[in-house]
Amino acid sequence: MNSLLYPICSAVALFAMVYKARVLTTDRSVTQLALVANFLLLFVIFTVSTPSVWPTVSDLVGITNFSGLLTQSCVIVMTACQQLVLLHLMYGARAARRKAVPRVLALALVLAAMAVLFAGAATHGEAPDDFAVARAQYTPAYLAVYLAAFTANQVEIGVMGWRYSRIAPSPWLRRGLRMVALTLPFALVYTCCRTADIIAAQLGGTGHRWEPIAQLGVGVAVIVQTVGWILPDWGPHLTAGADRLRNRRAYRTLTPLHRVLTEAVPEPVIPVSSALDLPTRLYRMLIEIRDAQWALRTWMDPEIARTAETRARQAGLRDEELAAVVEAAQLHGAIEAKRTDRPPERPLDTPVATAPGDLAAELAFQQRLAKAMASPVALEAAGRTPATPASSARTTKESA
């Protein structure tokens, strides 16, 4: 499995490192440097752990299974980098340095102990596919030290990440830290498998049966954690992309309504260049729709509004859906009354049936209104049928 999984993890780490390294041109804070170092170490870990690369690295150094010591040492240093990131996010620079010192010293002792125990182990040949299982058999103390440090650090990273995610200043940072924290169960799966390796070795067995589970656990943890660390950087691009898609969809939805109203009342229209950005054009469209709606007020018959409300309620419509149908019926009636020059004896006091609280609510409601223009309830309340010219908004929308 690691012949396929580890290269994938290596590629993900390389992509994250290259992506994040761009930030160093403008921000060389401890947080950014530690994140780049974290991704670099991940890249080294999974590249060297790939079975085809493992023996080459060991041969270059001239020490059997040196690749194992290298990769697991990199894991310990990597966790130190992650803790530095979280400490500098949670505390000021001075407090973060103070809290980081004992952690770094403890990890340095762990690395020294691992090196000593590794050097004292008997040689048993290169083990690119089952190094940890072999360590459990020949040097369980080495693996136990590594697992203790790895587990303690993963727990601390998970706890700190979850705590800070509750108060992080930006939504994408909160989401990223939650992803980092939620990798803890997968890391613990890896720890449990490695602990089981040690126990099985003491009982005369091996952990080869659950080795795929250990590899899968650490692989999933690494990929999800990597995504979590870079999410605050590329998350806002996702938000911007989603906003563009929503604006395009809203513009397409409102265009038929805007066309029908401004054909009846062209005065509110201010020509704008197609080169103008979409949010501005969409905002202008909202204003022109409302202006045209108010201009048509003097042609709106209160009876149509009452009929539309009654039929909408009978159809089970409530709240803004009901308001949209009522306004659509009023617009159909007003456009027809203006076309035939038959104003009502007493027009409505207001052409709107609801008052959205902000721009986002206004945009959402006008989209409901645009769809309600094709509603049979609105058309029938205005004395029209879906086949009549007054329902052209529906035909225009369907052809768009």
Image (cartoon, grey):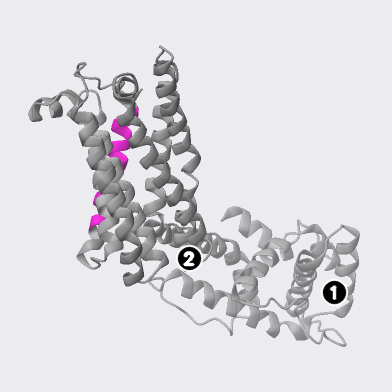
The answer to whether the residues at label 1 and label 2 have Cβ atoms under 8 Å apart is: no
Q: Quadrant of the N terminus?
A: top left
Q: Is residue 133 left or right of residue 353?
A: left
Mark 1: amino acid: Ala
17 part of magenta stretch:
yes
Query: Could you say which disc has been placed on residue 335 in the image?
Result: none
Vertical comparison of 248 with 340: above or below: above
Q: Is residue 310 left or right of residue 349?
A: right
Give the residue at x 69% y 76%.
356
Q: Is residue 211 visible?
A: yes
Residue 213, given in percent of the width and then of the height, sits at 45, 25
Vertical comparison of 334 with 364: above or below: below
- Residue identifier under label 1: 305
Q: Is residue 15 visible?
A: no
Q: Earlier in the sequence, mark 1 or mark 2?
A: 2
In the rendered picture of this protein, how many numbered marks are placed on residues? 2
Query: Could you say which disc has been placed on residue 168 in the image?
Result: 2
Residue 153, given in percent of the width and then of the height, sits at 39, 47
Between 303 and 238, the one nearer to me in the picture: 238
Between 116 and 292, the one nearer to me in the picture: 116
Vertical comparison of 126 with 332: above or below: above
Crowd rating for badge 1 (residues with CA inside 10 Å; few <14, some 14–19, many 20+): many
40 part of magenta stretch:
no
Q: Quadrant of the C terminus?
A: bottom right
Q: Circle 2 sits in a helix, a strand or a loop, which is it? A: loop
Give the residue at x 39% y 59%.
86
Q: Circle 1 sits in a helix, a strand or a loop, which is it? A: helix
Vertical comparison of 96 with 219: above or below: below
Residue 195, given in percent of the width and then of the height, sits at 43, 28
Give the magenta range.
5-21
Real-space Cα separation, disc 1 to disc 2, in angstroms: 49 Å
Mark 2: amino acid: Ala
